[in-house]
Structures are given as C-alpha cells and as structure tokens.
Image (spheres, grey):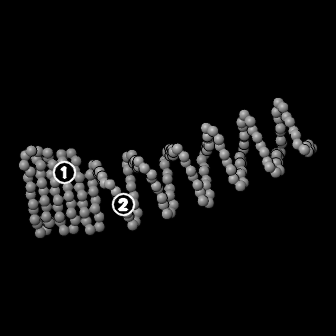
Amino acid sequence: MAGLICKIELNKERGITIEVTNEEGKITSTAHFDGSKITTTVKGSEETSTITQTPESIAIKCKTFTLDAETITCTSTDATKHVAEGTYTVESTKDMTLKSSANTTAEASSAFDVKAADISAKGSSSLALEGMKTDLKADTDVKIEGLNVSAKATTKSEIKGLQVNVQADGTMDVKGAATTVKGDMLQLSGSMVKIG
C-alpha cells in the first residue's frame, strides 16, 4: 500500500480542515470544523458518506447504515418517524411488544395479513369488524356467544348444515309474512302442540 497524503489547514475564516487521501484506493477522508458545525466526509470513487453535526442536530447520509450493539435504546421527547422507500422489516427472535398510551393505527394500501398460532382480539368497550365481504371460517368449531346475539341481513339470510339444531330454553318464536316448514319427514312433538 502506498503512503497516505495527510493535510491540515487552519484558516481564521474557514476553520480547520483535516484531510487524508488514499490515492491507491481512491478514497479521501475529510473532517471540517467551520465554527458552526462539524462535517465528516469519506468519498470514494463511487459513493460518499457524510456526517454533519450542529448544536441542534446530527445528520448521517450514506448508502448503508449499520448499528450493532448488545442493547439499543432510542427515546424522543417529540415525534419519531421511520420512512422506507423500499421494504421495511422489523424482526425479533423473542417476545415483541407494540404499545401506545393513545390511539394506534395500522393501515395498508393493499393486503394486510396477520398470522400466528393463536390470535386474540379484545375491545374493553366494543369490537367492530367491517368489510365489503367478510368471511369467518374454521377447520373445526365456530362459536359465537354473548348476552344477546343478533344476526340480521337486509336481503337474505341462510343457515345450512348436514344437521341444524335450533333450541331455546324458554320461548321460541318463528315469524314471517309467509312461513314455510318443509321436509321429506316432518315431526312436531311436545307436551302441548297448537296449530292454528
């Protein structure tokens, strides 16, 4: 490796500039102190990385930024924003917690997938699921339970199964403007059966 070219410039107007040039690798490293900020630049033949520090901010501009530590804590007293123009991935090999003391909004312009071995969704006051088309499907059992359960369709409602059981511990009312009970075999039984 050829020797490095090192320069230090002191100027009462421009400040202090420290420059190290690697002619063989075509890399120039520069640190500039101008009295209001510190600018550190590493310039290669194709890419350039820059760190700019002022009393209020630190700005880092580079092609690839890597942070490796045992523990990382990031705290902001005001807003925090992360923007990725490409793919954004958050991954943990252990438990992960997402918590807000106010509202939380998750939104996707196209598909939004949630997958887990067990999923629990709970609202302390209310829970609403809404969509142009909503499907609830289970490979085994589906259970809907509540103090009062209502199912309503503005046009048509269907219940189908190999066997369908409708049971009420108290009174059961079946009403309609026109009501039809039909089957290959129809059985009505009870301690008292009244028709008409």
What residue occupies the far left of the structure in this picture? 3
**Callout 1: few (<14), some (14-19), or many (20+) C-alpha neighbours within 10 Å?**
some
Mark 2, residue position: 74
**170 with respect to 119 (left or right):** right
Circles 1, 2 touching at the beta carbon (< 8 Å): no
Residue 43, label in figure = 1
Of the 4 image quadrants, the one containing the C terminus is: top right
**Callout 2: few (<14), some (14-19), or many (20+) C-alpha neighbours within 10 Å?**
few
Report the amino acid beneath label 2: Cys
**177 with respect to 122 (left or right):** right
The residue that appears at 71% across and 48% down in the rendered structure is 151
- What is the x, y in percent for residue 36? 21, 68
The residue that appears at 58% across and 55% down in the rendered structure is 122
> Quarter of the image holding residue 123?
bottom right
The residue that appears at 32% across and 54% down in the rendered structure is 70
- What is the x, y in percent for residue 29? 16, 54
Q: Nearer the viewer, residue 92 or 66?
A: 92
Report the amino acid beneath label 1: Lys
**124 with respect to 77 (left or right):** right
Marks 1 and 2, how far apart at CA: 29 Å
Sequence-wise first label, 1 or 2 = 1
- What is the x, y in percent for residue 182? 82, 35
